Image (cartoon, coloured by chain):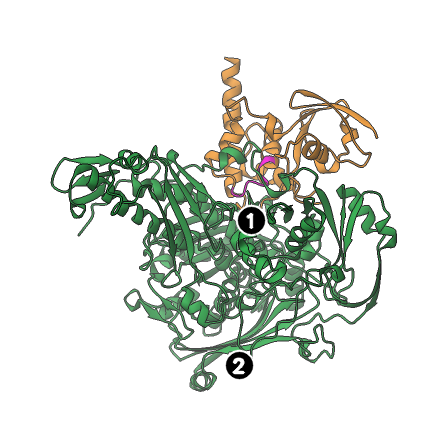
Amino acid sequence: MTHQPRPISETGIGASVRRTEDARFVRGKGRYTDDINLAGQTYVVFLRSPHAHATIKSIDLANARRAPGVVAIYTSVDLAKLGGLPCGWLITNRDGSPMREPKHPVLAEGKVRHVGDPVAAIIADTIAHARDAAELIDVDYDPLPAVMDMTSAAASGVALHEAAPDNTCYDWDIGDKAVVDAAFAKAAHLTTLKLSNNRLAPNAIEPRAAIGDYNSATGEHTLYTTSQNPHVIRLLMGAFVLQVPEHKIRVVAPDVGGGFGSKIYHYAEEALVTWAAAQLGRPVKWTSDRSEAFISDAQGRDHKTTVELALDKDGKFLGLRVETFANMGAYLSTFASVIPTYLHATLLAGQYTTPVIYCRIKAMFTSTVPVDAYRGAGRPEATYLLERVVDLAARETGRDPAALRRQNFIQPHQFPYQTPVALTYDTGNYQATMDAALAAADYVGFPARKAEAKTRGKLRGIGIAAYIEACGIAPSNIAGALGARAGLYEAATVRVNPTGSISVFTGSHSHGQGHETTFAQVVSEKLGVPFESVDIVHGDTARIPFGMGTYGSRSLAVGGSAIVKAIDKIVAKGKKIAAHMLEAAEADMVFEDGAFKVTGTDRQKTFGEVAFQAYVPHNFPLETLEPGLEENAFYDPKNFTFPAGTYVCEVEIDPDTGVVEIKAFNACDDFGNIINPMIVEGQVHGGLAQGIGQALLEHCIYDDNGQLVTGSYMDYAMPRASDLPSFAVSTTSTPCTHNPLGVKGCGEAGAIGSPPAVINAVVNALSDYGVSHIDMPATPQAIWRVIHSKA
Amino acid sequence: MPQVTLTVNEKPIAAEVEGRTLLVQLLRDTLGLTGTHVGCDTSQCGACTVHVNGRSVKSCCMLAVQAEGARVTTIEGVSDGQTLHPMQAAFRECHGLQCGFCTPGMIMSAIDMVKHHPDPDEQTVRKWLDGNLCRCTGYHNIVKAIRAGAAAMKAKTRENVA
């Protein structure tokens, strides 16, 4: 059956509908966690370790306990019955043994392992009193040497955890090394590159916050928290830390001011406020300040890699070999273990037909803040090393970097394409995105622009990156086989109200992505009801049946698909009701343009009439037709989705100062079908800014003693408006083949493709100086040094 | 405890505060005006930007007692009833916000910018935003929104004059 393409309605699929949620945000009427205040609430301040590694000899609380306004002070001895913060993914070592999972206590037990490790929780009637009291606590620390360098951590002779004497969390690999080595033996050219992927602070502008509340009559705990996935927090905190069943815990994640991964995880502060509220019979509120965020929010990236690419004499890729050290920080955060493995090593084919790939990952504990997923999570690290080594190979073999990439692209007719690193790409057209990006960037006109820049004393460079990502993580059965301790479906409930308005309850969580708009567009289009009569509800375990939350660009591909699945059930039920109303056979009913129709007749019932009848079932045959019109669905994806694209960055460098100016940034992405182009473009812009920030500005720098020297916005270079250009973004489309909307996800692409595009451009600009690589961030100082060391 | 009297969104306010209470704490905690946000502790992010006597000010780096006698406007005070201020409307129209957390500060800063630069070009906007951080939008659509908002403010002024 063929469908005529429907014209895009003003609010339907494909329209740039202005966002529903903005009505409150532009008025300052959002409701973020810190905006919530409960009667009788207390405030908690965490006393955190000033040492990167130390034994706690004693903690003297006497003076603090006597301070004005203090309600309670807790240390680890008070939390003896609580479990540790769990890790959600078990990685199996090369030798078949499980990874090491040292306990991650809510408050430090006998030892601190990074600056910022929480030691005591001080609860008082005001935040000022809690802070004052915290200063009166006397902790006697016996400092130990910090473990700062992940590449030498195994041989440092200092163990952070008894359970991991060589500071190794796991030693994992993928691919057949012997086969890859054999391919390398036949290579005509070998390109080798050592690089680091700099550690980043996610820095959502809303700091984390949490409020615990307890009803002693019902035994119900409520946690308000800045989370991307309230149901996951309920499960992890309830089952592993507090040992309270889910039905006695409600987790509310109201408006959340950005996440970028950092608000996925279950954090100590959430467990502490929930537990303490029950102890005290009063609500307990915590709001992080920014300095605290820098030493307590999970950070991102932090890999050190050696990559080798083997090519034949014609430039065909023969094999790829990668050895990476991945920094886990001091403890395993919720999803830390899966980032360098199944979200990184499995992406190393990129857009290419490289036949054999081997990757080994050594995940190390160090005396630093835990590392976990940050926008892109593993895929930026994979894309960066691959697109850097491909660029270097082009240069070493005298090939045009675009041509070398093209020559090795997986061709459109090769899909579905089985990579040598486990993934099967369902669809794509890498030539199309590259053609579009190069045309938009006027790639062929670059030499003239370079020559013109030279007359002004500027070094101009152009850089390409062709990325792939895997979104919508993942089929539960595959994830489970690979060590996931959770399913990775999404849940939705579609409730048709008696008057025909619709409430959608989704397990996805919006913290900037605009789900209230995008999801409503889908529902409005599918059910033929006005956009305004659809309400999207998210972020409250008491209202939403279940959910896995938002990360990995999964909301539309997985959460949206769950909504579509529930809508399909609504339509099926509606047909039954309409058939009954029209005294027709159910098999003769069709649903189109918002009405249930008897095929081949003009007899029909509108959606609103059917909705009303569902709740006023005066003459329903109750044995066969149940009143009501509400359906649940769980959607478990069949595969990842595979957005891909090409980014072209053009820079000018001032050789006197080392300052990089981005002159143009052209991005072309294939996200499959697009529901709201305006929102998708905005997602790409934001990702690009974070990727450019990584490439040029941002870096969590620790000194040898484990002090984070970039611990505030005065020191950590957040991208500002004047650091960034306007972006030129466009899309092509090969719809996803296995989800009902044909969508792929767009949240992370910008942050994945842009770092190598920028660094390739910078290295290209510096080519006259014989520079073949520069590590991120390519700050003016770093570039100036390179120029002056080579000049 | 010190007393402070001021006008907030055209309403007279008298409050008792600690000497160390910041203006943003008075607004958020005492007056319940939670549209003004706190995103850092080094006066870098600008999420707390309000107007004090018509000028944009970061309310995290001013003591409440320093606002004695001042006329303070917050994000809650810029719209005309149900009608959005042209800058608020421009942010929505141009998708100049995502999570919404930096947005009130951005809008307050932008309204003040337009007083100084009624017809700002892209570079002027980007430079002015030096004190406002956004992690979501990459600033692209914020710049667009502010330029559109400036044009709308100008048109509205003309309308009012005519």
Q: Amino acid at mark 2?
A: Arg
| Between A136 and A751, the one nearer to me in the picture | A136
Residue A94: mark = 2
The label shown at residue A588 is: none
x, y percent for residue A164? 66, 76
Q: Nearer the viewer, residue B109 or A159?
A: A159
Q: Is residue B64 left or right of residue A31?
A: right
Image height of A384 relative to A355, above or below: above
Range drawn in magenta: B98-104
Residue A314 sits above or below residue B161 on the image: below
Q: Is residue A24 visible?
A: yes
What shade does chain A have? Answer: green
Labels 2, 1: front one: 1
Crowd tier of the residue under label 2, counting other residues whose Cα lies within 10 Å: few below 14, some 14–19, many 20 or above: some
Q: Which chain is orange?
A: B
Residue A250 tag number: 1
Q: Quadrant of residue A267?
A: bottom right
Q: In the orientation shown, which residue stands out farthest toward the left?
A: A600
- Please state which amino acid type lies under the numbered disc 1: Arg
Majority secondary structure of the magenta segment?
A: loop
